[in-house]
Amino acid sequence: MKPQSRSLSGLRGVGSRAVVRLVVASSLAVVSASWAEDPSELVNVRRQREMAILAIRHEADAKQARLDQEYQKALDDMYRRYATQNNIAAAAAVLNERKKVFPGEAKPVEGLPSASGKFSWAAAGKSLVYRYKSGGFAKSAFDYSDRNHTKLLDGQFRDSAYEGTVAWEDSAPALVCFEFTLPVKPSRFRVHVLGGMPKAGYKPPRSVVVSDGDRNGPGREIGSARDLKDKPDWIDIDIQPTRPSQYFWVAIEKADAQLVCIDEVEFR
């Protein structure tokens, strides 16, 4: 009698996983046998093709790496040149391009120069950004938070609270970090504060302290203002940084009132 062949559907009592293992094992055996039976000439030609493909890919990767290195160097040179010329807007554009093309590149531009010449708020202020390291924003007649980080540099200020006012109600000093594109050395910090409205619940801050530092936090105090008059006004604080810096930290301490309110800042 001829031995009966069984199809997969005829494998009774065998689980689906066992069936799959049987099929895979059979297929691998057939392929291995096929490779083992290939003539040496075919094996050599196949190997040569695979090695050529690997060489092409390796060469393409190396070429891409060289192009990236050359482009990054060109951007760094351009950035330093614009910075030396105190062209803040152009330097910021190059820096944005660098971050876009090399998003994972954490290494800063080497040889970063300071903005040359006398400090210019008109030039440096265009690329100034800021962030808060403290919370506690108030919400009363208006939303006094600053989620988009734009209120303090929008060029608007008033003598009473409005939608552009930033206000805190925490007892701890509010802390703001201002970051310039290039290291700069201003000599004055100005902040417009609200005051003279005790019925509205706000007075000028008890103190405003300016410090140098880095991106992680404030360093040495370089200027301050205390015992402020209870009226809406600009507070001018002479600051004395020992060297140009990209980062300036401002701490604003609340007085004996419900809120402390500011709405605009400048460096001079």
Image (cartoon, rainbow, N blue to C red):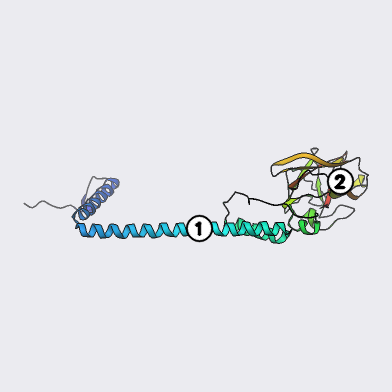
Query: Which comes sooner in the sequence, label 1 or label 2?
Result: 1
In screen coordinates, is 51 left or right of 77?
Answer: left
Mark 2 residue type: Asp
> Would you identify the image quadrant in which residue 136 lies?
top right
Mark 1 residue type: Arg
**Residue corresponding to mark 2:** 238
Mark 2 crowd level (few <14, some 14–19, many ≥20, 10 Å Cα): some
In screen coordinates, is 226 left or right of 31?
Answer: right
Q: Position of residue 1 (x, y in %)?
A: 6, 51
Most distant residue in the left direction:
1
Q: Position of residue 52 (x, y in %)?
A: 34, 60
Mark 1 crowd level (few <14, some 14–19, many ≥20, 10 Å Cα): few
Q: Which mark is residue 202?
A: none
Q: Position of residue 75 (x, y in %)?
A: 61, 59
Q: Which residue is depicted at the point 61% across and 57% down?
A: 98
CB under 8 Å between discs 1 and 2:
no
Q: Which residue is depicted at the point 90% across and 47% down?
A: 195
Element at label 2: strand
**Residue corresponding to mark 1:** 66
Element at label 1: helix
Above or below residue 247? Residue 156 is below
Q: Which residue is depicted at the point 86% across and 46% down?
A: 238
Nearest the camera: 43 or 14? 43
Q: CA distance from mark 1 to mark 2?
A: 48 Å
Q: Position of residue 216 (x, y in %)?
A: 69, 42
In screen coordinates, is 209 left or right of 83?
Answer: right
Q: Of discs 1 and 2, which sits in the foreground?
A: 1
Total numbered badges shown on the rendered structure? 2
